[in-house]
Image (tube, helix red, strand yellow):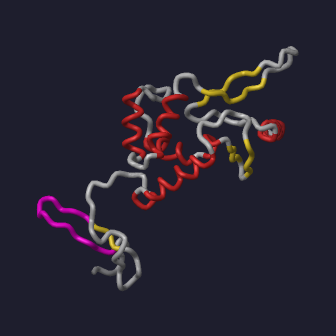
Amino acid sequence: SRKTRKALQEKFNQGWWPSWAPLGYVNVALDNGDGARSRKIVRNDPQRWSLLRAGFSLYLTGTYSADALRDVLHEKGLRPRTGKKLPHSVMVSTPKNPFYAGLMVWKGQRKRGRHEPMITLQEHERVLEVMDAHNFHVARIRRHRFLLSGFVVCGLCGQRYTAEHHPRKGKSYYHCARMQGHSN
């Protein structure tokens, strides 16, 4: 295991990604031509690269949420190995990943990679700004919009109030999110 860790660290120091390639990239074997063992590096995925690049362009407009972008990319043909729609967690973590801007972050280390970046560093920073602007950095779609969400706090414990909608009664209620030992 020590040799494996050392080899992975050496690969990272050389500027190559030491793990599985993220979405839009593939691991390929690079033959040195000297008969020695081939080294695996990360290259563009010919099937997914252009689709994901177009997805970043759409996300940079600020009009698409992660889930809406996932639906658009699925219609255009972007699918994981399973052939299904991309999981929500992948669609949220992919735009945040600095790997797409050419930066590798691995085990607390940062380094400029030798792979071809999909977006520029400025575009990556803009993507993070768009994520912050969308629903207070929450990546889910809200079913109900409550007027006082995030503003009202409990007078007893200081916890923010949460709201819930009861369709049978046709009413919405706010209450302390803690709900332990007290009721407001």
Q: Residue at x 44, y 46 (%)?
A: 61
Residue at x 53%, y 42% (from the top left corner): 94
Q: Residue furthest left?
A: 169
- Which segment did they paint magenta? 164-176
Task: Please provide percent x and percent y for residue 13.
Answer: 81, 41
Q: Is residue 47 above or below residue 148?
A: above
Q: Which of 57/136 is in front?
A: 57
| x and y, in percent, of residue 20 in the image | 64, 33
The main secondary structure of the magenta stretch is strand
In the image, taking residue 42 as reference, residue 63 lies left or right, namely left
Is residue 95 placed above or below 4 in the rendered structure?
A: below
At horizontal 64% and vertical 37% (from top left) the residue drawn is 117
Residue 174, magenta (yes or no): yes
Q: Residue at x 25, y 64 (%)?
A: 164
In this view of the protein, which residue sits in the foreground, 32 or 101? 101
Camera-side residue of 177 and 105: 105
Q: Which residue is most to the right?
A: 34
Is 124 in the magenta?
Answer: no
Q: Quadrant of the N terminus?
A: top right
- Residue 74, horizontal then vertical, whole percent: 40, 31
Q: Residue 87 falls in which quadrant of the image?
A: top left
Say above or below: 153 vs 9.
below
* Residue 103: quarter of image: top right
Query: In the picture, which quadrant includes the C terminus?
Result: bottom left
